[in-house]
Image (cartoon, coloured by chain):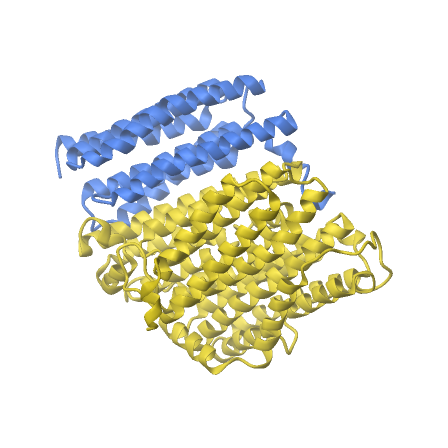
Amino acid sequence: MIPQLADLPLDPLHALLVIPAGAAVLLALLPGYWLAARINFLAALATLVAALLLLTERPAPSGYLFVDDLNVVFIVLSTFVGFTTAVFSATYIGHELEIGRLTPRHLRFYHAMYQTLMFAMNLGLVANNIGLMWVAIELATLTTVLMVGIYRTHEALEAAWKYFILGSVGIALALFGTILVYMAARPVIGEGNDAMVWTALMEKAAGFSPDLLNVAFVFLMLGYGTKVGLAPLHAWLPDAHAEGPTPISAVLSGLLLNVALYALLRFKMLLATNPAAIAPGPLMVTMGLVSLIFAGFMLYRRRDIKRMFAYSSIEHMGLITFAFGMGGALANFAGLLHMTMHSLTKSAIFFAVGHIAQVKGTQKLVEIRGLTSSHPVLGWGLVLGVVAIAGLPPLGIFMSEFLIVSSTFAREPLLAIPLVFGLLVAFGALMLRVSEVAFGEPVGSLAPVEASYVPLYAHLALVAAAGIYLPGPLVAWFQSVARLLG
Amino acid sequence: MHGTPLDVAHMLAGGMVLVSFMLLYQDRMFALLNVFALHAVVLSASVAWQAHIQNAPHLYVPAAIALVLKGIIIPVALHRVVIRLGIHRTIETVGGIGLTMLLGMGLVALSMVVMLRAAATADPLAREDLAFALSVLLLGLLMMVTRRNAVSQIVGFMSLENGLILAATGARGMPLVVEISVAFSVLVAFIVIGVFLFRIRERFDSVELQALDEFRGERR
């Protein structure tokens, strides 16, 4: 306990919510790009600091908010990527303004929505109430829908519409599941707010009606699974990633998918405490594997660079869901590590892709060639990112994928075959595409790029460092979370 | 709980399922909107009845919201949208009406089997309410799948949300936070949809989603 913390006007937990919410209001009112981008940056930084303070100071759970070992991982990751994306967004959006793709009015809206999204995701992560968590994820969905449609082109509107319809149906199914969990909890805990509080639910779940919990989990899996982007509910994801502003693609892939996965994990833990309920693992393993293999094959047919990396996100979310579905200390550890590495790598890739698309004026893969000779810093950044995401050693994703595969081999060798197959298929596709994009004769504009390389290389450095050496305290921390996950 | 209160609750919730079926086969826009208004009115009555028999006055709030917003304001607004877009002729449905109705019956049977069994330990009111609510939800989903037109998809989505509100109010003592948030989300959803429709109108002069499919990135 650090004594100075008591003197702060806000405890870190509330700061995590108040800072982005306040910044959103402020940014909605403020005109001017220069100031708005800086406030966005400062708010994201302050939120990150609040999240880091939560590591040392953990407030007691209330009826609505709580922090434990599990969600603090997600919070720190989420605020960190939120911060680096704000840095990237400042350069990216500055360029969009210059070329007139966004008007100053849109810009105000964009920044306000960015902070609203951060608020909604933080709220979803710290909510101690299944209803509140649902509301937060719904809010996050609505803000991203608005952001995806911000360019108002045919494609952007179609993507936003599709995302809105599929996201709403998903979120509606999740609400039905939430109601069923309440119905299961009510006879044991009693009416009212307590029957929706995580900490109370986890204590008493053993006495809930298993049949209701089973049906509830199916709805929750379908509902939140839509938001995770698991096949066959993934249809919104590639469009939403490809047509929105690139910072939003980075935040969607790096953060929002994780928040939905977090919700799923919580409910999985809830079911695990009830001995008579179905084991949620096999369901998650199946959907994870299907997503992995499906996305692996879909990667070959892509002609749009952002769309391709969106499919790669489906692939990795499938892999992470698979790992958590397998369960057990090692697979959970690997899943957590993979989730962290994927968030960092994928957002780094989107940072690179955003600048590339801006300088080339296109997202089509055929019109982007020879990046390493025309824009070496950016090109090599992309190559590094793709090498990392494809799972080549010595980078961080290699380690987490290796752990997932080896733990699967040890326990369920038959499942390891489709797993490795899917990974290899995706690997082939990514290598094929990146070699076309990065090497050979440059095509298209050779103009110098005004890019912020810091977020890109900071993420890649972290991923590389994690691949070579994981600090002991981090390992211990992830191990304790993995045990918590069961 | 037995006797008349239970019977009335059943009748109203069952009425919603019936109106959901009516939504499935409406092939004219105005008729569709009128039936949706009826759906909302039945929901409102059902929620108000729940408020009465559960002695839960706060449930009158969602009932009032359903009546005023979804029974009157939204249908009237959509009416205007339909006229402005000039799509007040027929709706194209995918597959025949007969097939859709059969599928709908199958979904209702499914939800009865699943919910009555799963919630066997709950009190009869809540159990059957949940079964009806799931039916309404699935029928709304079916409607969204079978329609291509953006306005009728919105109607399908709102009928799905009605099913959710039915479920939430049937769960006795469910915290107020959630009920208000559900009602609120409907409002937000409508605003979003309104914005969307406006933009789609602005850009395409058509709300046919099939026309939007043309712009898929893969076909560029």
Q: Residue A11, how many percent across, how many down?
A: 34, 60
Q: Give the colour chain A carries in the figure.
A: yellow
Q: Nearer the viewer, residue B97 or A362?
A: A362
Please name the residue shown 22% across and 36% down the image.
B58
Q: Residue A50, how many percent across, how many down?
A: 42, 62
Q: Which of B89 and A144 is in front in this view?
A: A144
Residue A336 located left or right of residue A160: left
Please name the residue shown 48% across and 43% down the image.
A142
Identify the chain drawn in blue: B
Q: Is residue B6 above or below residue A354?
A: above
Position of the N terminus of chain A by quadrant: bottom left
Q: In this view, does A454 lie above or below A144?
A: below
Please name the residue shown 74% across and 43% down the image.
B220
Position of the C terminus of chain A by quadrant: bottom left
- Please identify the quarter of the rendering in which residue A276 is found: bottom left
Q: Is residue A379 above or below residue B7?
A: below
Residue A122 located left or right of residue A409: left
Residue A213 seen by the camera:
yes
Q: Nearer the viewer, residue A291 or A330?
A: A330
Q: Residue B50, how many percent across, how many down?
A: 21, 34
Q: Residue A408, how many percent across, how many down?
A: 50, 75
Please name the residue shown 27% across and 56% down the image.
A197
Residue A291 located left or right of residue A283: right
Residue B95 seen by the camera:
no
